[in-house]
Image (spheres, rainbow, N blue to C red):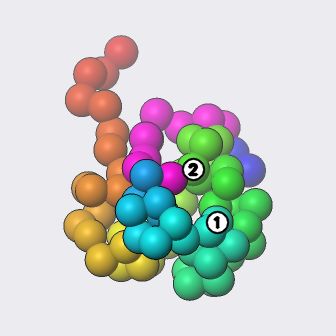
Amino acid sequence: MGKPTRVTNRIRALRFAHGEMTQAELARRIGVTRQTVIAIEQGRYSPSLEMAFQIARAFEVPLDDVFQYPEDQD
């Protein structure tokens, strides 16, 4: 895994809003390990653009409903 990211996400909230989907179920739907889902949820790993779209599609929401990037530039 890479360095921590400034990208934030709502994956945990979306999982619970979608029938309390487990990390394992989301991982299965997008073709990764549960550990990868955990790392993304915790902000320790940024998914590829393709994986980000797969995650958004799993929840049937737009990409920016799942991932956010802060506007302030340090």
Which secondary structure lies at badge 2?
helix
Which secondary structure lies at badge 1?
helix
Q: Of helix, strand and loop, which mostly describes the magenta segment? A: loop
Tell me the magenta residue range: 3-12
**Quadrant location, the C terminus:** top left
Mark 2 closeness class: few <14, some 14–19, many ≥20 residues within 10 Å: some
Q: What residue does disc 2 label?
A: 41
Above or below 49: residue 1: above
Do residues under tags 1 and 2 come within 8 Å of each other at their CB atoms?
Answer: yes
Q: Residue at x 64, y 66 (%)?
A: 23
**Residue 31 left/right relative to 34:** left
Q: Is residue 53 visible?
A: no
| Residue 10 position within the rendered picture, expressed as x and y whole percent measured from the top left | 41, 50
Magenta stretch encompasses residue 32? no
Magenta stretch encompasses residue 10? yes
Q: Quadrant of residue 53?
A: bottom left
Q: Residue at x 74, y 50 (%)?
A: 1
Real-space Cα separation, disc 1 to disc 2, in angstroms:
9 Å
| Residue 43 position within the rendered picture, expressed as x and y whole percent measured from the top left | 57, 41
User: Considering depth in this image, is 31 or 12 the residue closer to the camera?
Assistant: 12
Q: Quadrant of residue 55?
A: bottom left
Amino acid type at image mark 1: Gln
Mark 1 closeness class: few <14, some 14–19, many ≥20 residues within 10 Å: some
Above or below 23: residue 30: below
Q: Residue at x 54, y 70 (%)?
A: 21
Amino acid type at image mark 2: Glu
Q: Is residue 22 visible?
A: yes
| Residue 72 position within the rendered picture, expressed as x and y whole percent measured from the top left | 26, 22
Q: Which mark is residue 23?
A: 1
